[in-house]
Image: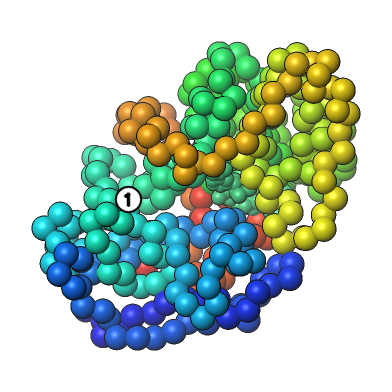
Amino acid sequence: MTETALTVQQTARPMGFPTPDHFRFAESPVPDPSPGTALVENLYWSVDPYHREMMDGDFELNAPLEGRTLGRVIASRAPELPEGAIVFHRRGWRTHAVVGPAEARRVPEYQGVPLSAHLGVLGGTGLTAYVGLTRIAGLRAGDDVFVSAAAGGVGTATGRFARLLGAGRLIGSAGSPAKVRHLTDQVGYDAAFDYHEGPVRDLLAKAAPDGIDVFVDNVGGDHLAAAIGALRERGRVVRVGTVGQYNTPGTSQAHFNHADVVEKSLRIEGFLVSNYRDVQRELEEFAVPHLQRGTLALDETVVDGFERIVEAFLLMLRGGNTGKILVRAT
Ligand SMILES: NC(=O)c1ccc[n+]([C@@H]2O[C@H](COP(=O)([O-])OP(=O)(O)OC[C@H]3O[C@@H](n4cnc5c(N)ncnc54)[C@H](OP(=O)(O)O)[C@@H]3O)[C@@H](O)[C@H]2O)c1
């Protein structure tokens, strides 16, 4: 076992895009578990857009950051967390964490399912996609669905789940031609476009000439305005996130025809996945058999080495990931 633990700390509040100068790595001795806790050596870390939102005020400066993480118990003084157990916890952005049973959950080991899936399609990312489709959109067989940031973690999970749940035409937008190809060739989207190639309204009209029933929105802004125009009667907008604004404060908000919402009887609903933890078991009952049969694949960008966690986070904010971005211990 290594003698030194590393944590990442935020040192300053960014305006716009953060840089490596907003972080530092701090060394400390590997902690000992106190009675009722266990020492976890972390194996996989999730870096997420919400971390960017937390950098504006929620993360304390010069203190270890928090995030969703998988690790192995290497020393235990808690019978619920025996040595060798693989656990999920939120004390991430560090190589080692001391956790109690209330803050760490043992991860079920499903045959044939890679561990990383527990931070992707079986984790908060997959739960967000699943809740968005089943609880917020109320997806019906044959519904035509448009997804923004479709090549990211939530976006790829949304596309794959929507296909398995019987959606009709699937349309996605993403930030590069390679991502567009990934959506149509791998994920199962019927049409996709690079949103840099023109006004989103025009690109969407071409990709979905007959309109859409559901919009799963990870971006906001022009995407939201275009989708409201394209939605059919009784269409639904699932507001998942606003990643188009996190690094550009002052970005103009979506301008859309408000009468459309009334005249087409549209529903626009946002949600926080943290309010839907009770759906986790249902997600696993749905997704695990598909993962085991090979009818559901993982879309991942894996960055190797804890020392690259800041790099991975900054890469994701600029669209460098396809699928769920993860950092893996080496
Ligand atoms: N409501 C909830 O509880 C909940 C839970 C989880 C996530 N979320 C939200 O879901 C969204 C996706 O999260 P994720 O974890 O799956 O991240 P992700 O989509 O894997 O990564 C972020 C992606 O955003 C895209 N992006 C960045 N700037 C953009 C811009 N200006 N316009 C359009 N796209 C942009 C980039 O892809 P491109 O190359 O395509 O630009 C990037 O890959 C985020 O808005 C996040 O906040 C919400």
Q: Which residue is mark 1?
A: 115
Residue 89, above or below 117: below
Please tell me which residue lies in front, 78 or 155: 78
Secondary element at tag 1: helix
Instruction: Residue 217: name its quadrant.
Output: top right
Residue 321, above or below 194: below
Q: Residue 229: image x %, image y %?
A: 83, 26
Q: Amino acid at mark 1?
A: Leu
Do we see residue 150 in this rendering? no
Do we see residue 13 in this rendering? yes
- Crowding near pointer 1: few (<14 within 10 Å), some, many (20+)? some
For the point 59% across and 24% down, the residue is: 137
Residue 8, above or below 43: below
In-image side of 184 versus 7 (left or right): right
Q: Residue 272: image x %, image y %?
A: 54, 42
Instruction: Residue 85: name its quadrant.
Output: bottom left
For the point 62% across and 36% down, the residue is: 270
